[in-house]
Every structure is written in C-alpha cells, then in structure tokens.
Amino acid sequence: MDSVKRKETNRPVVVRNPNLCEMREDILYHFNLGTETHNLPALFGDVKFVCVGGSTRRMKDFIKYVAAELDMRDPNNDYPNICAGTDRYAMYKVGPVLSVSHGIGIPSISIMLHELIKLLHHACCTNVTIIRIGTSGGIGVKPGTVVVTKQSVDGTFVPKFEQLILGQTVVRDTELDSDLAEELLRCGEELGQFDTVLGNTMCTLDFYEGQARLDGAFCFYRESDKQKYLTKAREAGVRNIEMESTAFAAMCKMSGLRAAVVCATLVDRLKGDQLSSSHDVLQTYQQLPQILVGYYIKKKLKALI
C-alpha cells in the first residue's frame, strides 16, 4: 500500500525525447516561453490540474469560473494571457489550475500538447490531471447532454490514433483513464443539473464530410448513407463526435498524464446537421463541461485539505 502511495505521490510528466537533453534551451515557441528565459518551475511547478479547450475566450471564462469556485478570485486580477506574446494559443492560471486553448483539430491540439507536456516536465510537475473540455455533436443523445469519454475512436470506430512519421504510419493507443472517467460521471450525477453519460467519442479529421454532414461545400452521399453510418457509430457505443480526442488521448498516455475528455453536445446528428438552438441556449450548453470539471477540481482539492 505504501509503495502505491509513493508511486502516486511522485507521478512525473514524462517526455520521450533524448534530444532535449542536448539542447541548451528548449524554446516553447507557440507559448512564447523558454527554459532559459523563464523560470518554469517557479511559474508552473504547483500545477495539478490542466484544462484544455478549443476557444481562447472559453478558456479564459473557465479560469474565471474556477477562481470563483475555489475562492481564489482576485478583483484586481484580469487573469492575463501568459502566452500574450503569441497569437496561436492562450494560457491562464489560478492556483494549481492551468487553462489552455488548443484551437480546432488534431494538428492544432498536437502542437499545443507537445509544448504543454514539455512545459509541465521542465516545471517538474507531478500528479497532473488533464481534461479536455469542449462541445461536440451528439449521436442519439439530446442537446445539452454532457458526454464523458469512455474510449476515443477514429472514423472506423477503432480506438487508435494514426500518424505519419518519417513517411511511415505509426499507430498509437487512445486509452484514457477509466477511473477518472467514472469519477467525472459520478460528479455529474452528484450535481444533478444536466444529463451526464459515459460513451465512446468519435474523433474525425474534419467537420463536414468526415462527420457525414450534408451541408458542406462538397457531398457525394445521401441522407440514407449518413443515417446508416451514424447508426453504426451509435451501435459501436459512440455518443458524440469531435476532432481532437484521439491525438489528445494518445499523447497524454505517452506522457503519463491522467486524462479525460468532457464535451457537451449541441445537436443530435441523427436529427440534423445544423444548430437550431438559440444563441443563449448554446452558450448555456458550452458552460456545462466547465461546471462539471470545476466541481471535480474543487472536490479533489477539498479532499487534500
């Protein structure tokens, strides 16, 4: 039992690149940070929770929300963007919580994660939990449902992330932390404010044809083809669709990060492609993952006191 506790207490963020040891300085270009120009352990060494999401505005809203939930709100602090020197990503911090935007799609989130993982490693962070929060299209669930990802799958419903490296296809596992997913599901049930379900998340390479939409600039299939495909996805356990989770899951697993994906659904894709809810309703849906994750973080920190 003691060995288990020691292992958990000292769980580092792993990088798997021997070339980093030979570099005088590691410049995290898209964050406008560096190991020589910034004291990363002093700035980020206390980080225990990282939340990432596509929108810059949403991630600033999240850090404000978490600051209030944790009673760390400072009326004189506008929560400045730590990465203000670049226009690619935004980063905000309050206490042990880091909030980072990742843009849209696998290429954008993978660039961010390479630099985030290195940042956490250089800062000597341990026991870090990382959660992607966002929005998605639902499959057979009503809009406003929050899906906690059980398994991230590709467009063929297989739990894998494929990437071309040196001209060769490399396949990586997309396993997420099942205990963390169950904890988040229980938090949703405890909150009782919205429907929270556990299901597979399908990650696609684009928003239109890759997700069987009929409203893109190009479409060479019929409504019946779309319904057949999405029904197969539903039968394979898929409950929502987004564009980042396979890369997120694979990279977090390789770095030893405890990871989860929490997304609100904005539309049931079995019933349509375009959003029909009002702007105010959609804004409410977008806030649901931050409510769930904020509750989880507050609960975990309270347990440590």
Image: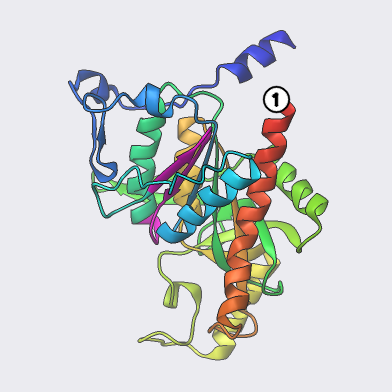
Q: Nearer the viewer, residue 94 or 226?
A: 94
Above or below — where is 230 with respect to 40? Answer: below
Residue at figure coordinates x 46%, y 34% from the top left: 254
Quarter residue 199 falls in: bottom right
Q: Nearer the viewer, residue 174 or 289?
A: 289
Quarter that holds the C terminus: top right
Q: Which x, y percent locates residue 185?
A: 74, 50
Q: Amino acid at mark 1?
A: Leu
Residue at figure coordinates x 38%, y 22% from the top left: 41
**Residue 256 shown in magenta:** no
- Circle 1 packing at 10 Å, graded few (<14), some (14-19), many (20+), is few
**Residue 97 shown in magenta:** yes
Residue behind mark 1: 304
**Left or right position of 127 against 33:** right
Please give the range of residues in magenta: 91-107
Above or below — where is 175 with respect to 217? Answer: above
